[in-house]
């Protein structure tokens, strides 16, 4: 892992960095090598043969039309680890803003949406190795697909940077922008805690102040998302009761579309 990513301005994130033409999954690569690699190691792949999404779903992209990026993080506590999905989402949203996609929002906990459609999915996974616990955060960003690609795959709620902006982006530049932003947000999380990021997250979150459907353990309930707990849980009023919904335990959808 000794390659350099062009345009990267970080101190520690993406150092080392490796790019592969093909991997089963960038998350799996870092999980398998987590012990040997340092905090901040990052990998990308042109093509994943077994890219994974949340809830066991597959994540597909064609060769070099999307970004598959994973980072290895070794946070000091479980509390920090559980906030990583939200921190990654803030970082991707901020990177997209810098890449001139100003209207991106966060669908809780960590999908990035533009005009009500998903442009990025994030999968953060824990790795336990002996006494050590690490995190691997994988980000899949649709970059160059045109709208017909998603229509052909029956994905009405998916979009790409190109489909939204008409601009062609270099995948490596998108990767560098995400890593630059993620280093800033991760350092702030450790220096000042999630309190320092919470307002920005709430302002970016398209789920809050919406009617939502919560699917948990097979049960479907409807309510209103009203805020965020300091743990990153979504606060939803369900049958008049303020309820904390933890990421990973439930899926939340808007009542009138994807968000
Ligand atoms: C989701 O379901 O929305 C999460 C998708 C996460 C996809 C990314 S692509 C890079 C990394 N490698 C994987 O196998 N998954 C994540």
Image (cartoon, rainbow, N blue to C red):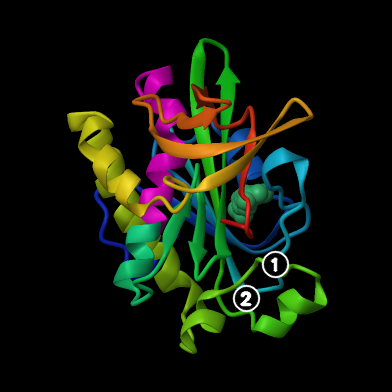
Q: Which mark is residue 126?
A: none
> Considering depth in this image, is 37 or 24 the residue closer to the camera?
24
In the rendered image, the vertical position of residue 77 relative to residue 120, given as above or below: above
Q: How many C-alpha atoms fall within 10 Å of the one at disc 2: few (<14), some, or many (≥20)?
A: many
Q: Tell me if 73 is positioned left or right of 239 in this view.
A: left
Task: Judge whether residue 88 is colored magenta.
Answer: yes
The spot of residue 56 in percent (x, y) is 76, 40
> Considering depth in this image, is 51 or 10 the residue closer to the camera?
51
The C terminus is located in which quarter?
bottom right
> Considering depth in this image, is 200 or 14 the residue closer to the camera?
200
In the rendered image, the vertical position of residue 21 relative to residue 136, given as above or below: below
Residues at marks 2 and 1, CA–CA distance in whole angstroms: 7 Å
The spot of residue 209 in percent (x, y) is 42, 46
- Residues at discs 2 and 1 in contact (Cβ within 8 Å): yes
**Range drawn in magenta:** 74-92
Task: Judge whether residue 37 is colored magenta.
Answer: no
Per the image, the residue denoted by label 2 is: 65
In the rendered image, the vertical position of residue 165 relative to residue 62, given as above or below: below
The spot of residue 57 in percent (x, y) is 76, 47
- Asked which quadrant contains residue 124, the reply is top right
Per the image, the residue denoted by label 1 is: 61
Q: Could you tell me which secondary element the residue under label 2 belongs to? A: loop
Residue located 64% across and 32% down the image: 250
| Residue 1 visible within the image | no
């Amino acid at each position: 892992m000794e390659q350099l990513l062009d345009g990267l301005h970080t101190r520690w994130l993406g150092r080392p960095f490796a790019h592969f033409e093909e991997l089963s999954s960038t998350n799996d690569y870092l999980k398998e090598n987590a012990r040997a690699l340092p905090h901040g190691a990052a990998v990308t792949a042109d093509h994943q043969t077994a890219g994974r999404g949340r809830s066991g779903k597959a994540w597909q992209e064609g060769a070099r039309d999307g970004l598959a990026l994973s980072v290895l993080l070794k946070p000091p506590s479980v509390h920090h680890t559980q906030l990583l999905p939200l921190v990654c989402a803030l970082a991707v949203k901020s990177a997209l803003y810098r890449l001139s996609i100003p209207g991106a929002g966060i669908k809780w906990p960590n999908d990035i949406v533009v005009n009500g459609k998903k442009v990025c999915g994030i999968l953060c996974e824990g790795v336990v190795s002996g006494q050590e616990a690490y995190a691997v955060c994988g980000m899949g960003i649709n970059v160059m697909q045109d709208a017909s690609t998603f229509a052909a795959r029956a994905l009405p709620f998916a979009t790409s940077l190109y489909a939204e902006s008409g601009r062609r982006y270099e995948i490596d530049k998108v990767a560098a922008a995400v890593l630059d932003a993620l280093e800033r947000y991760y350092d702030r999380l450790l220096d000042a805690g999630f309190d320092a990021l919470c307002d920005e997250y709430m302002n970016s979150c398209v789920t809050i102040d919406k009617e939502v459907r919560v699917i948990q353990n097979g049960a479907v309930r409807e309510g209103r998302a009203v805020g965020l707990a300091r743990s990153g849980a979504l606060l939803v009023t369900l049958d008049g009761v303020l309820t904390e919904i933890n990421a990973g335990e439930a899926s939340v959808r808007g009542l009138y579309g994807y968000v």
